[in-house]
Amino acid sequence: MNAYLFSQLPLLIGFGLLLALAALRPQGSPRVNALSQAITLLALGLGAVFTQAWLAPGDAFFGGAIRVTVIGRALAYGALGIAFLAALLSSDYLAKIHARPVEFRMVLLAQAIGIFHLPLAGDLATLFIAFELVSIPSYVLAGFNHRDGRANEAGIKYLLLGALSSALFLLGIAFLYGATGEISFDGIQNQIGVFWLSGSGSKLLLAKVSLAFFLSALFFKVAAAPFHAWLPDVYQGTNLASLALIAAPAKVALFGLIALLLWGPFAYLHETWKPVLILVALVSAVLGNLQALTQSGRVGLKRVLAFSSTVNAGFILLALFLDSAGAFLFYLTAYGITVVGVLAAFMALGTRTSDVEGVHDLRGLGRRHPWIASGLTVLLFSLAGIPLTAGFAGKFAVVAGAFSPGFEPVSGYLPVLIASVVFGLVSFVFYFRIVRALWVRDTLSGAELEAASQLRAAGFYAPIVLAACVFLVLLMGVLMRSPGMP
């Protein structure tokens, strides 16, 4: 059997089984819920394992429509592994928000199929289909809890602004095909190389216009500043189970798409896109940190996570600028695992009827739920870049890459790197607010004391995922060996 078809077979079979289950069995049944969860986890787990085992770098399928590279394969199975953790979280949480579990997991697997294909795309047609397979399920997931008005707002806002991103993406494809007459990435890269060497100004200009459209669309999707204005509202209205999928595995795959394009078809235009990455990284560091400082009080935890995403996007773009595949993969994987872990902690600390919304909702919970609070503290330290965590290791790899032998940074790179690190210190403030609320003894009002004493909705799966994420974050932080990263 074709190795590519075999590797994605678990996802396709899983989606088909869920479709049949939704049609034939009542969704309110606990057995149906458990069966759909088992099918989903098995499909994601086998999909990740088969991708690693059956696909080898250098493989090409269907005339080059699918191309397997070292980075693409690593991103594909890494994103599916993170999606597995995110899917595990939904087991207890979906009943809490009265969501239809089988339908939710169908959307999850549809997104997973797009996540699988996005880093492995070898031509423009496959690329666009995979891009939409990630995007459209994300819109559905954002508004999945239709009983919540904020979820409806998040879904509509994400859909409308996402349509703009898709339009820009299509314009990028159109200009690129118009300039090169090719749809395969190899052919496009060769044609742009010819334009670059021969000085063919008009066609090279079209390729640069295409690059601008692609970057605009993808910066929106990964919430790099100043394209991030939609992010806090969407995060705020999205339920935690959906957010774990939108904020982690989907973002890993979309960053992988940026690397796929910049290090592939647009490699000859590095003098054009590298200064853009520097500028966007700087703006992301400044705006992300300063806006996160304003998020506090009773509604703000998800918004802090949103602006934290923008800050981390800046560091990931710097890793792309460095052409450091090791640092890029390490940082992206560490960030995805950390975000899933933080959301698992938020799920575990919520009550049976409501989620934790703001910093005030966490007051006093460190003493009542020390293990969950300790795990959340470690993950927040990782986001802040405290030593011995994966977050610190990733940031160190990006910084150290600028001083590796033979690297000659373009003008302005080092000031941007220093500014990103300095503004990164600002993040200690808003992360510390959350840690302080968990652990520092304050005088609680009667209502706050009653809220802190309510039964938590930890369930069984959220603490397990939290523990797994904490273990991986600490393991990655301790075993980090060098700036290049294995």
Image (cartoon, rainbow, N blue to C red):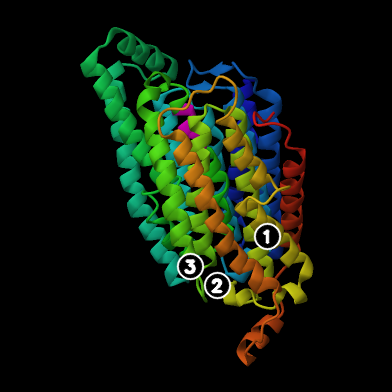
Residue reaching furthest top?
A: 198
Q: Main secondary structure of the magenta part?
A: helix
Residue type for callout 2: Gly
| Disc 3 from disc 1: Cα separation | 30 Å
The dot on residue 364 is: none
Query: Which residue, given by chain and number where applicable, does mark 3 sit on?
Result: 295
| Disc 1 from disc 2: Cα separation | 24 Å
Residue type for callout 3: Gln
Labels 1 and 2 touching (C-beta < 8 A): no
Q: Secondary structure at mark 1?
A: helix
Can you give x and y, in whole percent of width and height, for residue 61 in the image?
Answer: 54, 18
Q: How many marks?
A: 3
Can you give x and y, in whole percent of width and height, for residue 77 in the image?
Answer: 64, 35
Mark 3 nearby-residue class (10 Å; few <14, some 14–19, many ≥20): some
Instruction: Between residue 109 and residue 282, name the one nearer to us.
Output: 282
| Disc 2 from disc 3: Cα separation | 9 Å
Instruction: Between residue 202 and residue 115, name the one nearer to us.
Output: 202
Query: Which residue, given by chain and number where applicable, does mark 2 sit on?
Result: 358
Residue drawn 39% across and 12% down? Answer: 190
Mark 2 nearby-residue class (10 Å; few <14, some 14–19, many ≥20): some
Q: Is residue 90 visible?
A: no
Can you give x and y, in whole percent of width and height, for residue 461 in the image?
Answer: 73, 60
